[in-house]
Amino acid sequence: MIHKTMIASAKAVDEAAGIVEAYTNTMGVMDADGDIVEPTAFDTSIAGNLPIPVLSGHDQGKLVGKVIFAQPRYIEGDEYRLFTRMQMNMETEAGRDAFSNVAGDYVREWSIGFNIPKESDVTQEGSDVSTVIRRITNLDWVEVSSVIRGSSPSTSTVAAKASPVTEEKGAIPSHLTAWVEDAWDGQLMRGRIKGGAATLRASHAWVDTEGDPELKSSYKYLHHHIGRNGRGGPANVRAITTAMANLNARRTSIPENDRRGVYNHLARHLREAGRKPSELRSAKPPDHSKPYPNFHACRIREPEDFDKFRTADETIDDKPVVVLYGREVETGDWDVASYHLPVDDWTEDEARAFCEEHDGIKFEPATGEDEDAPGDDDAPGDDDATDDAASDTAPRAALDTAQRTLRLQRIKLALHGIHNQNKEY
């Protein structure tokens, strides 16, 4: 078995549960043995081997605790460190002594024990025996020990505390991992998951703050392949791009303040795969029922219920109406979002009564003619960019007269122009 060690210091917070947090290995830079452990070398073991035994001095007869969470974390330059959360067995004398030694700063270094699964997991750089560098790309992590002296540089124990540590909930911090572009079946992958919080956190980008971290139902944005053994594997690019599209379309029930954290997690994977992630759109949707110059607006449902909008010309009570339809975030079904009633055909009182009859939740009367209204090509100071953006999406109304057709067309252009101006959501 191969051992790698790093210097550590400790801080005791509480002794009830014996939780110790430490950086137990340095990756990406050469250690005292002339080896460079790649930052992704631990991924398979973290997904499949937890909990990993914690020993004293690599003595298998001195089991003192277990690793309950581990994650490579970026430091600077080429350097990563293996953040490790361990729980000492406080029901045994050995476990209590181990915690006391770490918390009291009597033991300041950590050493990991691992095997190399196959020869191809190690490459060598250089031919001189005295200067050759081994690069370890994959390993089988077996145990971690507190030791007197080790070989891995620049390490420290983060904390030693007894209260059970609940991993950050909400958006799960990003992590370095391998990636693939294979076909993706989210339902199949979710059905394969076995294991508790460690596997679930390693495979998802969000966990419910109120949920049980040991249950699948508490997690969203699964984007890692799950093997037949129930353990997590590489991130899937197709799953990530789908998840980011859902974020931007707001087809999600996660809290708004978690969207950015989930986006950052997924975007990092895409960058590591050589892809440029799309920007995260603002969460605030356009308000399609606010007052406009030349038509009254009747809101039927809140804009945040939908992720896309489209208009249609209809005749209601023998009068023209532009209906704004929205696609529901949760179901994907289309439903009426609001009605827009031209001022030349509807008085304010008629439009207000219409809104009440159709169970509208908000009515906004027209503000009056506006010479610079979007879509009005004849008006001075007209916004041609808005006209161009809207022209491809505004179908021509089928009305009785050319004058009414032009009027409704301008209304629709205004709606689409406003929608396009606010499509950063």
Image (cartoon, rainbow, N blue to C red):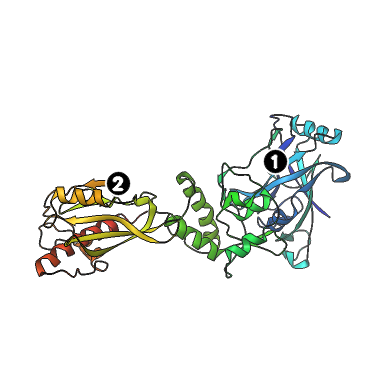
Q: CA distance from mark 2 to mark 1?
A: 55 Å
Is there a contact, CB below 8 Å, between mark 2 and mark 1?
Answer: no
Residue drawn at (70%, 41%), measured in percent from left and top? 22
Picture coordinates of residue 232 (x, y %)? 66, 59
Q: Is residue 178 visible?
A: no
Residue underneath mark 2: 361
| Mark toward the start of the polypeptide (2 vs 1) | 1
Q: Is residue 80 above or below residue 403?
A: above
Check the image and report above or below for 12 versus 409.
above
Q: Which residue is mark 1?
A: 22
Hey, what amino acid is under mark 2? Ile
Q: Quadrant of residue 125?
A: bottom right
Q: Residue 376 is drawn in which quadrant?
A: bottom left
Q: Residue at x 75, y 58 (%)?
A: 139
- Residue at 79 percent across and 32 percent down: it is 101
From the viewer's perspective, is 196 left or right of 273?
right
Q: Position of residue 214 (x, y in %)?
A: 66, 47
Residue, x 11% and y 54% (percent of image)?
Answer: 371
Amino acid tagged 1 = Ala
> Could you say which is closer to the camera, residue 203 or residue 318?
318
- Mark carried by residue 209: none
